[in-house]
Image (cartoon, rainbow, N blue to C red):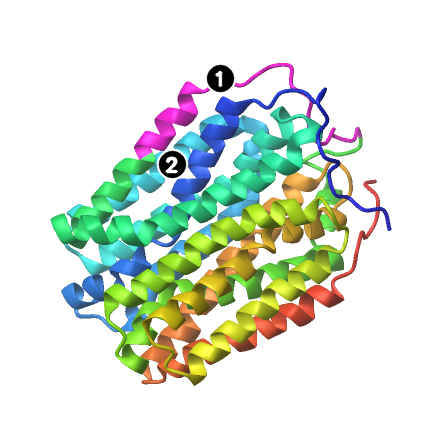
């Protein structure tokens, strides 16, 4: 099998379109900020509305159901109407959703606004990858993907401390409103950046490819792509369990104060972002992407198992969660290269848009599993469940098939 890693850029490599990359990264930052928005504020929202963990999980479920149903169609829409305008529209839809969720004092209205935010969320991956693939030179596309992923991870890492700061000043509703304004700022940035007309595309379109042909759906529903989708679902369930329920589970299991649990969560998310950059270096030096991914996920198995088994105390807890974040972050570039290896030339955007619906499918399943465990009074099983799902992801990635076929 030919390795698909990008060659390191030479001194003569074309320049990067930095303003465009900056705008795409800003959008990805906001998208991940929105994904994590409920985790640090969950105790305050739940107390205000007097709902169970399972009920409040409906907001996350609504977000992910909408994203799952609409993301693949959004990928085709991006190709037809233009990625930049749809990316700005998605940011503004998310901004409106969280502004209104903060202003209107109704739990079910908040659930509806999370569903609306899911509509905005559908455009991020298709539009981001379409813009990068079209305007970033092929010699630099690996770097651009790595920085793009890092920006999303950074958005998730910044979310807990900034949301808690806004909550301390204006309450959780003020934190939602502040997050909504952020979406409009990022949308303005995207709209101000002009697309270049003569950049070398990262992957030229094959003449036979057409969005209207059934062959595209045959590719998306082929066994290798579906197995990659399963892998993404498992990663999403694992990450959701740690990101959205670790704070509440630690408090119920060991009496960990909210501030300490959120510090550990922040450490995990920050180290995850740093791990993505480290993974960008690893992915250019090896073609053993499945091995890298399996080893990284194995780190999450060990970390979750330790937290489930032992009351680690403040510093050890922060260190273990930070290590878990780094080990899962480092796999992200390898994860993307695994998708490339299963994708015929010229179909990366469509396939990645489809496969990343696994994040949303996992987001639907995770609240049902982990919310029910919390409501049943089993916080330890949250971390046991994360470890089990991570182990399943290890088994999945080492059995993933390689490249299925060439484009028709």
Q: Is residue 24 left or right of residue 159?
A: right
In the image, which residues are magenta?
184-207
- Which residue is located at x 81 percent, y 46 percent? 3
- Which residue is located at x 49 percent, y 40 percent? 124
Mark 1 or mark 2, earlier in chain: 2
* Magenta span dominant secondary structure: loop
Of residues 303 and 366, the one nearer the viewer is 303
For disc 1, the marked residue is 194
Of residues 19 and 209, the one nearer the viewer is 19
| Discs 1/2, front | 1
Whether 265 is among the magenta residues is no
Establish if 196 lies above or below 312: above
For disc 2, the marked residue is 91
Q: Horizontal and vertical percent for residue 150? A: 50, 44
Residue 102 visible, this orientation: no
How packed mark 2 is, by other alpha carbons closer than 10 Å (few <14, some 14-19, many 20 or more), is many
Q: Secondary structure at mark 2?
A: helix
């Amino acid at each position: 099998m030919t390795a698909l890693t990008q060659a390191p850029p030479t001194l003569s490599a074309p320049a990067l379109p930095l303003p465009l990359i900056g705008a795409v990264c800003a959008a990805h930052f906001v998208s991940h900020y929105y994904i994590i928005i409920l985790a640090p504020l969950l105790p305050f929202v739940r107390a205000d509305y007097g709902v169970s963990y399972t009920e409040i999980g409906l907001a996350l479920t609504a977000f992910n159901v909408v994203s799952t149903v609409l993301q693949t169609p959004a990928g085709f829409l991006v190709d037809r109407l233009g990625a930049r305008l749809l990316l700005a529209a998605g940011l503004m839809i998310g901004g409106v959703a969280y502004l209104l969720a903060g202003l209107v004092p109704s739990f079910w209205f908040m659930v509806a606004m999370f569903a609306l935010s899911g509509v905005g969320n559908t455009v991020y991956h298709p539009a981001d990858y379409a813009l990068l693939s079209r305007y970033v030179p092929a010699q630099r596309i690996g770097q651009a993907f790595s920085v793009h992923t890092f920006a999303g991870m950074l958005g998730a890492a910044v979310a807990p401390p900034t949301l808690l700061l806004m909550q301390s000043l204006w309450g959780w509703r003020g934190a939602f409103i502040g997050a909504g304004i952020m979406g409009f700022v990022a949308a303005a940035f995207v709209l101000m950046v002009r697309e270049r007309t003569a950049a070398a595309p990262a992957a030229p379109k094959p003449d036979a490819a057409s969005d209207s042909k059934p062959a595209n759906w045959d590719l998306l529903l082929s066994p290798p792509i579906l197995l990659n989708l399963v892998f993404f679902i498992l990663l999403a369930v694992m990450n959701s369990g740690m990101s959205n329920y670790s704070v509440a589970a630690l408090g119920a299991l060991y009496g960990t104060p909210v501030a300490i649990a959120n510090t550990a969560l922040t450490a995990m998310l920050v180290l995850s972002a740093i791990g993505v950059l480290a993974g960008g270096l690893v992915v250019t030096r090896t073609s053993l992407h499945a091995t890298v991914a399996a080893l990284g996920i194995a780190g999450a198995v060990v970390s979750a198992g330790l937290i489930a088994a032992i009351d680690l105390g403040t510093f050890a807890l922060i260190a273990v969660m930070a290590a878990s974040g780094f080990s899962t972050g480092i796999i992200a570039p390898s994860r993307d290269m695994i998708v490339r290896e299963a994708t015929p030339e010229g179909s990366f955007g469509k396939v990645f848009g489809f496969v990343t619906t696994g994040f949303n499918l996992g987001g639907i399943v995770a609240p049902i599993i982990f919310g029910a465990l919390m409501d049943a009074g089993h916080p330890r099983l949250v971390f046991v469940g994360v470890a089990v799902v991570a182990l399943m992801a290890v088994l999945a990635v080492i059995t993933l098939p390689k490249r299925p076929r060439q484009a028709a």
